[in-house]
């Protein structure tokens, strides 16, 4: 996406100011990065606004009352804005024995970790995917960065110079770190099915109708999706796993001593993380930007037909994936206001005695299923599928014959060799078929 | 002046961050600040890994080192500094000796690194001609014993299995060592 | 003269080479060694160990990177694989060392390594 914006901005500058900018000039990339960050920060901020209102409405309805109805018309949708203005005008407190620098730093660390996860999540795929950072190891990167949010929590708890904050922070850190294990195991199952950690590839392999979704690929993946949902709820510290920030337990846990805008940063980080894991679930298991029925491709809106048709399809896909993400967050809210809270030892027990074994069984089962029936439950007509079975049907060749010693050691690669290497296909599953230099 | 090569600029940025925070770890006296500076230094090192083309290892560094090991160390810091912060300072003589030895070691390492002619950099055109290859799949295949990147290289399957068993042993050992004891005796000096 | 010297030392217009990565690795290593030598807090010593291992990791990655050197002496993927195992083993060793430090704290009620002198003499 950076190159597209770069070219657009270069063209704009040339048209407006008659500058001719070099193709790899840094200015375009910096401006493209700023555009990406602007979009993502707005997504998190507006998302938080929407989710706080949604939470109050959903919780109200579950508790048989109406929720906010006054600010901004009949549905109270400006309530969060009013809350935000109230938070801005609150007094900025700091406890007396607090470590000032760490106290101020902690909310920003949480928010940065949450924002960094959004950089690698694609909102639409195809030839020109709508993603800020098109990484080859996107799933891995997102899991790694979501695990960094725990530092903000620990620093907040420690620097508040209060016993309750420290206990809450330690419990929350222990919970998040424990649940990273089954979360990682569950996230690896779609990676296994798609053959790549690139989220754009995983999303695009679920193109077509809803029976191509990895959720319906095999029963083990179905189980894995529900375990993923449980671990995602636990790793963003939502009820029923929210002992660390529960009001009836530890005053308010690690953010007891925070007030005003600093407190709202923690909440933006929490809702941002909820949206991030929900978007990740929708891309990994629920088809991402491909809807239950293939609307865009049946209308002829693909990149093969034309650039702007593809962009239209991508915009539809973005709306689709955002809708699925918001649906996931709504399910999390529904679970929160329905189920009672778990004790901390019950939380850790759930992780180590239930989620980890079920995730491991799901992973093993999906591996065996993929080996035996690579095309999934229902026959699909797509040509490329990461297929392990092919490897095992090859005739065994003696090692020396398959790997003759090469005498190119000590010499730099000739230009023809470099050209040959550059002409090789770049996708991951093609690595199995690299020809040897002697061919 | 030649145009700035932006990967070099990013290299300087990340290495300045890594070195500055590493020096801050040595200089600081508050253990919590030291742990925080180490987190920043390791995150900057992960950025250096990405710049050298090791994207998988960089992601592993963030996931395991920063997200796991350092959380563990910060837990340890919290658990062992419950009472008031006794500032444990080293004597000046020790600091001076350590500083001299450290500086001489650093000079030796830098002289060794700078004096090998094969370790200079490439030119821009040579770097631009190198194909960008993702490293996740070759590393994965290598860990399973099949090296797909070069012909005369060996797989890492045995090491993978040994490390897995090693981690299991360490898990059990650390859980046993850190179990809750019955009483806590206080040694009076 | 100064700009020429700086341009020679710092790779601002040219791509960095192995030597630049090795210098950064050396800084991390020496800082870690100083930490291990001078800190009295046991957790401080552990932080030094982590810095040392990171300096070594940077060296491995630098030698195994195809963008930094072009001759056949590059380690290739071996450098990255070795680095991977160093990261894993460092995590394991930090866990055990932390368990030992916690035991020490529970027994002696202090985390100062200078107080660990019962086996002296």
Image (cartoon, coloured by chain):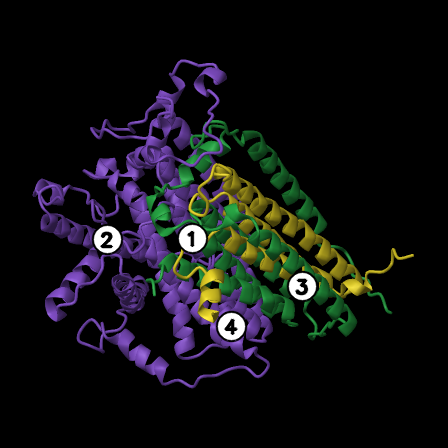
Q: Nearer the viewer, residue A45 or A9?
A: A9
* Marks 1/3 same chain: yes
Q: Which colour is chain C painted?
A: yellow
- Mark 1 and mark 4 on one chain: no
How many other residues sit within 10 Å of disc 3, few (<14), some (14-19) or many (≥20)?
A: some
Callout 3 touching callout 4 (CB < 8 Å): no
Left or right: A84 in relation to C69 = left
Chain shown purple: that is A
Question: Looking at the image, how many numbered discs can be counted on the residues?
Answer: 4
Subunit ID for the residue under disc 4? A
Same subunit under labels 2 and 4? yes
Q: Which residue is mark 2?
A: A130
Labelled pair 1, 3 in contact (Cβ < 8 Å) = no
* Viewer-side residue, A438 vs A219: A438
Q: Dot 1 corresponds to which residue?
A: B51
Residue that carries the numbered disc 3 in the rendered image: B103
Chain with green colouring: B
Q: Chain of mark 1?
A: B
Q: Which residue is drawn at the image coordinates 46% and 21% (left, top)?
A: A403
């Amino acid at each position: 996406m950076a190159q597209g914006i770069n070219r657009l901005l270069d063209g704009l500058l040339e048209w407006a100011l008659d500058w001719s900018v070099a193709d790899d000039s840094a200015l375009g990339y910096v401006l493209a990065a700023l555009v990406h960050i602007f979009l993502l920060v707005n997504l998190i901020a507006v998302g938080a606004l929407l989710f706080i209102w949604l939470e109050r409405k959903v919780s109200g309805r579950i508790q048989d009352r109406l929720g906010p109805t006054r600010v901004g018309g009949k549905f109270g949708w400006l309530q969060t804005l009013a809350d935000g203005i109230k938070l801005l005008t609150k007094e900025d407190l700091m406890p007396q024995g607090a470590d000032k620098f760490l106290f101020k730093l902690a909310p920003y660390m949480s928010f940065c970790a949450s924002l960094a996860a959004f950089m690698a999540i694609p909102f639409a795929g195809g030839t020109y995917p709508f993603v800020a950072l098109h990484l080859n190891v996107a799933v891995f990167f997102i899991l790694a960065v979501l695990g960094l949010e725990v530092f903000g929590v620990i620093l907040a708890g420690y620097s508040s110079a209060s016993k309750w904050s420290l206990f809450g922070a330690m419990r929350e850190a222990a919970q998040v770190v424990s649940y990273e294990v089954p979360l990682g195991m569950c996230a690896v199952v779609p990676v296994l099915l798609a053959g790549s950690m690139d989220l754009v590839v995983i999303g695009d392999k679920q193109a077509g109708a809803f029976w191509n979704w990895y959720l319906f690929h095999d029963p083990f993946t179905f189980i894995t999706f529900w375990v993923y949902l449980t671990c995602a709820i636990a790793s963003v510290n939502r009820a029923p796993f929210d002992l660390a920030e529960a009001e009836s337990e530890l005053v308010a846990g690690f953010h007891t001593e925070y007030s005003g805008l600093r407190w709202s940063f923690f909440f933006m980080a929490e809702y941002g993380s909820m949206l991030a894991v929900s978007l990740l679930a929708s891309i990994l298991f629920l088809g991402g930007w491909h809807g239950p029925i293939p609307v865009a491709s049946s209308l002829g809106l693909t990149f093969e037909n034309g650039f702007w048709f593809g962009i239209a399809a991508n915009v539809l896909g973005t709306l689709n994936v955002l809708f699925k993400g918001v649906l996931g967050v709504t399910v999390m809210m529904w679970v929160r206001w329905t189920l009672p809270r778990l004790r901390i030892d019950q939380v850790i027990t759930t992780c180590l005695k239930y989620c980890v074994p079920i995730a491991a069984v799901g992973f093993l089962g999906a591996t065996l299923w993929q080996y035996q029936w690579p095309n999934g439950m229902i026959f699909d007509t797509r040509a490329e599928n990461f297929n392990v079975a092919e490897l095992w049907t090859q005739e065994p060749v003696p090692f020396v014959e398959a790997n003759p010693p090469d005498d190119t050691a000590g010499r730099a690669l000739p230009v023809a060799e470099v050209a040959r290497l550059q002409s090789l296909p770049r996708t991951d599953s093609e690595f199995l078929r690299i020809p040897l230099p002697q061919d | 002046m030649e145009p700035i090569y932006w990967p070099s600029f990013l290299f300087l940025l990340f290495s300045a961050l890594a070195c500055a925070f590493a020096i801050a770890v040595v200089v600081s006296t508050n253990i919590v600040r030291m742990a925080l500076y180490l987190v920043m230094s390791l995150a900057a090192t992960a950025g250096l890994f990405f710049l050298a083309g090791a994207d998988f290892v960089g992601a592993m560094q963030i996931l395991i080192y920063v997200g796991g090991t350092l959380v563990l160390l910060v837990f340890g810091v919290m658990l062992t500094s419950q009472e008031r912060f006794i500032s444990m300072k080293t004597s000046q003589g020790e600091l001076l000796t350590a500083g001299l030895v450290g500086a001489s070691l650093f000079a030796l390492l830098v002289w060794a690194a700078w004096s090998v002619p094969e370790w200079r950099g490439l030119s821009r055109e040579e770097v631009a001609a190198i194909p960008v290859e993702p490293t996740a799949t070759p590393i994965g295949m290598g860990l399973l014993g099949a090296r797909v990147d070069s012909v005369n290289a060996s797989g890492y399957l045995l090491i993978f299995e040994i490390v897995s068993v090693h981690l299991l042993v360490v898990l059990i050992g650390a859980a046993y060592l850190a179990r809750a004891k019955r009483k806590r005796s206080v040694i009076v000096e | 003269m100064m700009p020429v010297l700086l341009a020679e030392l710092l790779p601002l217009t040219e791509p960095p080479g192995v030597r630049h990565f090795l210098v950064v690795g050396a800084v991390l290593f020496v800082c870690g060694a100083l930490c291990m030598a001078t800190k009295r807090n046991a957790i401080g010593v552990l932080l030094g160990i982590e810095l040392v291992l990171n300096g070594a990791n940077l060296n491995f990655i630098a030698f195994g990177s195809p963008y930094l050197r072009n001759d056949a002496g590059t380690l290739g993927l071996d450098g990255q694989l070795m680095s991977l195992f160093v990261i894993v083993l460092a995590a394991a060793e930090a866990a055990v060392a932390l368990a030992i430090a916690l035991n020490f704290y529970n027994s002696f009620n202090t985390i100062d390594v200078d107080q660990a002198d019962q086996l002296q003499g």
